Amino acid sequence: MNNVLIRKFVPYIVLFIGVIYGIWPIDAVPDVPIVGWVDDFGVIGAAILIFLLFYLKRKNKNTKENHFSLPEL
């Protein structure tokens, strides 16, 4: 597959799957107060983090001035 195409759409797919998992009624851990919500928050948080890392890295490459650097993924 085209590497550019993958880097362009993977963050959005990961974010979409993470949000869907968080609102889907069937979970890996049943939604009992606090214990069952931990996996939902973990998956949603990881999806948002991955999305932001890819987004900021791509945005950073498009700017002429590099204000900060992100680790290679």
Image (spheres, rainbow, N blue to C red):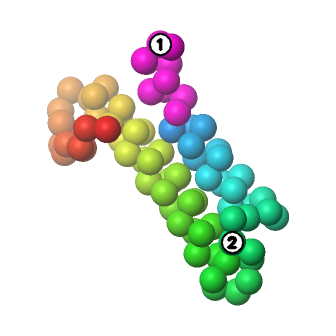
Q: Which residue is situated farthest in the top direction here?
A: 2
Mark carried by residue 41: none
5 inside magenta stretch: yes
Give how far across and how far down residue 21 sits, in percent: 69, 56
Q: Amino acid at mark 1?
A: Asn
Give how far across and how far down residue 15 sits, in percent: 58, 46
Point 69% across, 65% down: residue = 28
Q: Is 46 placed above or below 61 here?
A: below
Q: Amino acid at mark 2?
A: Val
- The Cα atoms of the two marked residues, 1 and 2, are separated by 36 Å
Mark carried by residue 29: 2
| Residue behind mark 1 | 2
Q: Is residue 5 left or right of residue 70?
A: right
Point 67% across, 77% down: residue = 36
| Foreground of the two, 43 or 9 | 43
Q: Which residue is situated farthest in the right direction here?
A: 25
Q: Is 57 placed above or below 52 here?
A: above
Report crowding for label 2: few under 14, some 14 to 19, many 20 or more residues within 10 A (C-alpha). few
Q: Is 45 placed above or below 9 here?
A: below
Q: Which residue is situated farthest in the bottom direction here?
A: 33
**Badge nearest the viewer, 1 or 2:** 2
Q: Is residue 4 left or right of residue 41?
A: left
Which contiguous range is marked in magenta? 1-10
71 inside magenta stretch: no
